């Protein structure tokens, strides 16, 4: 891999771009603009752009540094940015670049089926605002049949939760929800100094791809409900964690799934949660599940 910036890519100069418009990074939007050319290049390479899969949806295009790297890799970029102050900067920067479409939109409300209908199977990438990481990931999970690769930058501790193994202290709701349908690989870390302004934490780039063998039961509405209940209080046994949603059926469900009710949630594999979801489905109400969150009520407990 070459060390210099990719040929033809415009070097990121985030501070001057902002200053020229009288702007500063907005904390409310979680803006930390990546400007390390090596990291930008590696992210673009992870997207594996090819002639039959050129369309990349970039979440949070910001000032266009990653956009430029993606174009250099051969991508046609749908650059999504919700900050109306940054959209004119993007439009000016890429006004002569046919392979960039600027979409002023909130990534959480994108019409993924419409984008898929227009462009075919998508690749998604972006530097996710830390406070929106979980909603964006769960939203992408719901549309996993429409994309081929998801390359995202997240806080390092979130990346570790995403890729954790059963029994690990970082293994939790986020891990199990993603693992039902996706393969998760932590690719590399990015230090604070690679950004403007520097965040207070280290970031990590994570690659997610749809599993060819999704976990049986992971597609059921019961799956997120069972997982959420199981991890609601990690000190509880699985039986006590599931009893609030299953009531008198809890022992029947555990027996049918072949799962020990005295076990703790963090020891179960995604496949075991899938078995629980299949057994629990007939006993759960059709009421909507609580909003998605990756926060375990007792996350620090082992």
Image: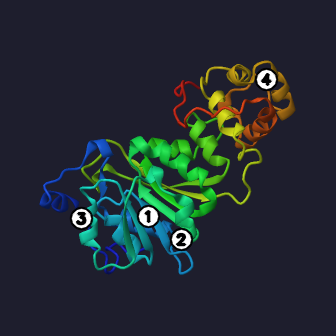
Nearer-N-terminus badge (3/1): 1
Q: CA distance from mark 1 to mark 4?
A: 45 Å
- Residue matched to label 4: 250
Q: In the structure shown, which secondary structural element does the residue marked by tag 4 occupy?
A: helix
For image coordinates 55% across by 53% down, the residue present is: 140
Q: Is residue 46 left or right of residue 273?
A: left
- Residue matched to label 1: 43
Q: Quadrant of the N terminus?
A: bottom left
Q: In the structure shown, which secondary structural element does the residue marked by tag 1 occupy?
A: helix
For image coordinates 57% across by 47% down, the residue present is: 163
Q: Is residue 11 visible?
A: no
- Judged by depth in the image, the label closer to the viewer, 2 or 3, is 2
Q: Position of residue 12 (x, y in %)?
A: 26, 66
- Judged by depth in the image, the label closer to the viewer, 3 or 4, is 3
- Residue matched to label 2: 118
Nearer-N-terminus badge (1/4): 1
User: Dot 1, how many residues are within 10 Å of its Cα: few (below 14), some (14-19), or many (20+)?
Assistant: many
Say which mark, if any, is on residue 89.
3
Q: CA distance from mark 2 to mark 1?
A: 24 Å
Nearer-N-terminus badge (4/2): 2
Q: In the structure shown, which secondary structural element does the residue marked by tag 2 occupy?
A: helix
Q: Which one is nearer the viewer's eye here, 237 or 181?
A: 181
**Residue 211, quarter of picture:** bottom right
**Residue 292, quarter of picture:** top right
Q: Quadrant of the C terminus?
A: top right
Q: Position of residue 56 (x, y in %)?
A: 47, 68
Q: Are marks 4 and 2 in contact (CB under 8 Å)?
A: no
Q: CA distance from mark 4 to mark 2?
A: 45 Å
For image coordinates 75% across by 19% down, the residue present is: 247
């Amino acid at each position: 891999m070459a060390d210099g910036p990719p040929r033809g890519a415009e070097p990121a100069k985030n501070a001057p771009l902002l200053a020229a418009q009288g702007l500063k990074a907005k904390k409310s939007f979680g803006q930390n603009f990546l400007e390390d050319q090596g990291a930008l290049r590696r992210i673009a390479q992870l997207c594996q752009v090819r002639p039959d899969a050129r369309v990349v949806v970039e979440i949070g295009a910001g000032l266009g540094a990653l956009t430029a790297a993606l174009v250099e890799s051969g991508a046609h970029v749908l650059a999504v940015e919700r900050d109306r102050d940054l959209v004119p900067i993007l439009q000016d920067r890429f006004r002569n670049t046919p392979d960039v479409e600027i979409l002023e939109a909130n990534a959480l409300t994108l019409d993924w089926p419409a984008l898929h209908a227009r462009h075919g199977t998508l690749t998604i990438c972006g530097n996710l605002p830390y406070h929106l990481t979980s909603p964006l990931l769960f939203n992408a999970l719901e549309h996993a049949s429409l994309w081929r690769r998801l390359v995202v930058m997240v806080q390092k501790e979130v990346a570790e939760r995403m890729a954790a193994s059963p029994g690990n202290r970082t293994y939790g709701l986020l891990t199990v929800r993603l693992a039902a349908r996706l393969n998760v690989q932590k690719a590399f870390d990015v230090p604070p100094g690679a950004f403007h302004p520097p965040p207070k934490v280290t970031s990590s780039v994570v690659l997610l791809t749809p599993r060819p063998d999704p976990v049986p039961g992971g597609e059921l509405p019961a799956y997120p409900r069972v997982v959420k209940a199981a991890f609601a209080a990690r000190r509880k046994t699985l039986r006590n964690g599931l009893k609030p949603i299953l009531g008198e059926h809890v022992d029947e469900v555990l027996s049918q799934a072949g799962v020990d009710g005295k076990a703790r949630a963090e020891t179960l594999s995604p496949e075991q949660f899938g078995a629980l979801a299949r057994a629990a489905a007939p006993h759960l109400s059709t009421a909507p599940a609580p909003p998605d969150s990756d926060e375990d009520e007792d996350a620090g407990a082992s």
